[in-house]
Image: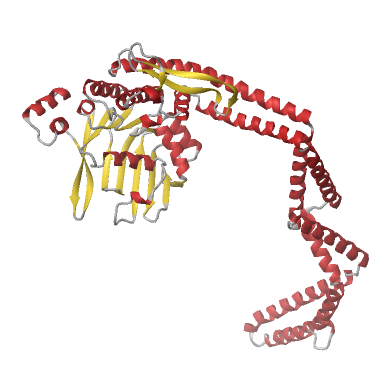
Amino acid sequence: MLRRLHVRDYVIVAELELEFGSGFGVLTGETGAGKSILVDALALVLGERADPGVVRPGCERADISAEFDVADEAAEWLLANDFGAEMCLARRVVEANGRSRAYINGVPTAAAQLKALGDLLVDIHGQHAHHALLRCDAQRALVDAYAGLSGLAQEVATNYREWSKLREALRDAEANNAASERERELLGWQIAELRRLAFDPGQWEALIQEQRRLAHVAALVEGASQTVLTLDEGDGAACLLVAQGASRVAALAEYDPALREVGDVLESVENELREAVRALKHYRDRLEAEPHRLVELEQRIAAVTELARKHRVPPESLPHVEQALARRLDELQAKADPRLLAERTEAAREVYRSRARRLSEGRVRGAIDLSTHVSAAMQELAMAGGRFEVALTAVAEGAAYGMESVEFLVSTAVGQPLRPLAKVASGGELSRIGLAIQVITSQSGRTPTLVFDEVDVGIGGAVAEIVGKMLKTIGSQRQVLCVTHLPQVAAQGDWQWSVTKESAGKSVVSRVTPLDHQGRIDEIARMLGGVTVTATTRRHAREMLGF
């Protein structure tokens, strides 16, 4: 669960260091004080898209870090990605120029990795989550997530794309067989040419070196001979001069032992020179012109170079060219055989349908369970007699999302027929139904921390109290944070913070104050009474809090 959140120079937050408790916590305050900003900061540190506009005016960067207790899936993910599992510290830095950096346990990482970890740590329900439920794709994704089918749904989508690709290939093969035949002939000829060359990139450098040596045999022999003459055979040869110098110094060392070291050096130089002469003579004597081998090498190099130029690659890449051409030829040959391609298409279809059937079975179970629980929750949310149903409609040939479409149907009163959610619910009803769905789906998940950002908009009175009790119930099992304007919801919290906006020179900053008993009474009274807080509203607040 979330333990600490540190925010610096983010929007209107100068610096905040917050320590979170377990259970159900609420954040309250006037509109615009920065309650949702804290939720946005948490989303950012968990991998949401960075925007330079979040940097507080006049500052170089925004810096947010969040510390979590980890267990189960999050701990396994950290270990699997080499971040260690003793702790979890996520950090995000956004520069004023738009660049951002992400860290997990102090190790630089990609924002995508941070988001993958964040999905295992925190589930954020935003202010506009209700409206997203009007989209069929969002409804389908929610049912799949609720039933634990998200991974299977992705596999089905992949299988469908593979099947579709093969179906398209089969149609192309039947329509473009003549053009395919010409391309196959060209590919066959090119592959045969490359295989006749039998080019080995590992021997290419040695081939070049041998050709260069044979092409310059005369120069090599002459150079070696001239060097031997200079060192050992000519007048004033270096070996003779050094030997004479060594002998002279050795004689002088009889008078001054300090010269013995110099004599030793000269003697060593003489030996090294004579060794070099012997090596040069041996090299020169072994050199011989091989005109036939030189011609053979030059022809080989020319053939390799010409073929590499034809394919517009360096010689070393010719084997890769051959492999790519062979793969393309295999593809065309498979396409050229409608029977084989039809068999592969049918096999892909069966893989798709098998997984899609499993997905359908899971969706049926999930739809029934979700429908039952949301319908029950609607009775508590001032929609007595209302019904909710997840309708699954078969899609004849199937689609990337499976073999059925998903649609949320609702009846908000006794005797009313079920109709699509988008066409039936008013704003207030949509808020209540959406909240019921979010609460139910949250209970089925395993994310340790749930955040509800003003999802109670559009409700009030007794319904708001029921919502607060629902969130408190979830808080007995997991950490729940809720940004709310409703005193009925706030009064159910195990702990409460007040968020205020204050002047700081020429700017404003957001402050967060943990509230004690009296502070909670004052804050609930403010939420009840508005600008003027009376003794009556304080009494009412105390009653709501049970103090």
On the picture, is 212 further left or further right than 49? right
Residue 480 location, x and y as percent? 31, 29
**Residue that protrudes farthest toward the top in the picture:** 415
Name the foreground residue: 254 vs 528. 528
**Residue that protrudes farthest toward the right in the picture:** 292
Q: Quadrant of residue 413?
A: top left
How many numbered marks have been drawn onto this rendered protein structure? 0
Name the foreground residue: 87 vs 336. 336
In percent of the image, x 29 and y 57: which residue is there?
Answer: 58
**Quarter of the image that includes the N terminus:** top left
Residue 367 location, x and y as percent? 46, 18
Name the foreground residue: 386 vs 47. 386
Residue 294 appears in the rendering: yes
On the picture, is 263 further left or further right than 142? right
On the picture, is 542 further left or further right than 290? left
Q: Is residue 250 above or below residue 128?
A: below
Q: Is residue 351 above or below residue 107?
A: above
In percent of the image, x 82 and y 79: which residue is there?
Answer: 228
Residue 267 location, x and y as percent? 73, 78
Q: Is residue 191 above or below residue 333?
A: below
Identify the coloring: secondary structure
In percent of the image, x 81 and y 71: which residue is there?
Answer: 279
**Quarter of the image that includes the C terminus:** top left
On the picture, is 454 further left or further right than 229? left
Q: Quadrant of residue 44?
A: top left
Residue 85 appears in the rendering: no
